Image (cartoon, rainbow, N blue to C red):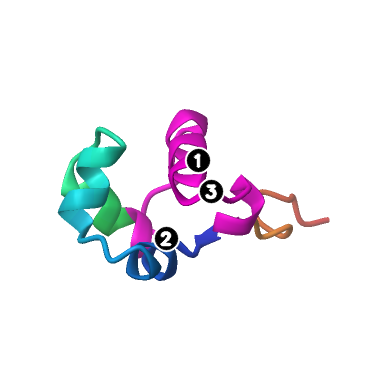
Amino acid sequence: MNNRIREFRARHNLTQEELAQKVNVRRETILFLEKNKYNPSLKLAHDLAELFHVAIEELFIFDDNQGQLKS
């Protein structure tokens, strides 16, 4: 899953630390999210989308090929 967190964070002039405080996570969580090394919980995805006033689907890009079994 990819995301546009860095883009939306920049639009809102927020540092990773400021964004982390607003959604009650550590700065490292935001760092890992932005590097696509961590998939957020549904609650965190919701909180981020709500903070940026966008739908979850606008913030997170789901790769349809992930998790599918190869035949």
In the structure shown, which secondary structural element does the residue marked by tag 1 occupy?
A: helix
Magenta highlight on residue 47: yes
Give how far across and how far down residue 12 sits, in percent: 35, 63
Under tag 2, what secondary structure? helix
Label annotation for residue 28:
none
Q: Is residue 63 above or below residue 11?
A: above
Secondary structure of the residue carrying numbered label 3: loop
28 left or right of 3 in image: left
Q: Residues within 10 Å of mark 3 (few under 14, many from 20)?
A: few
The reply to whether residue 61 is in sight is: no
Q: Residue at x 42, y 70 (%)?
A: 7
Name the quadrant of the C terminus.
bottom right
- Where is residue 9 drawn, in percent x and y? 35, 62
Quadrant containing the N terminus is bottom right
Residue type highlighted by circle 1? Glu
Residue in the picture at 77% in, 56% down? 70
Residue at the far top in the pictured view = 43
Q: Nearer the viewer, mark 2 or mark 3?
A: 3
Residue 37, x across and y down, in percent? 36, 57
Answer whether labels 1 and 3 touch (C-beta < 8 Å): yes
Determine which of the numbered discs, if any, sits on residue 50 in the image. 1
For the point 26% across and 49% down, the residue is 19
Q: Is residue 46 above or below residue 4?
A: above
- For the residue pair 50 and 3, the one nearer the viewer reads as 50
Mark 2–mark 3 Cα distance, whole angstroms, equals 12 Å
Which residue was labeled with disc 3? 53
Circle 1 crowding by C-alpha within 10 Å: few under 14, some 14–19, many from 20? few
Residue at horizontal 58 percent and vertical 51 percent from the top? 54
- Crowding around mark 2 (Cα neighbors within 10 Å: few <14, some 14 to 19, many 20+) is many
Mark 1–mark 2 Cα distance, whole angstroms, equals 12 Å
Tell me the amino acid under the disc marked 2.
Ile
Residue, disc 2? 5
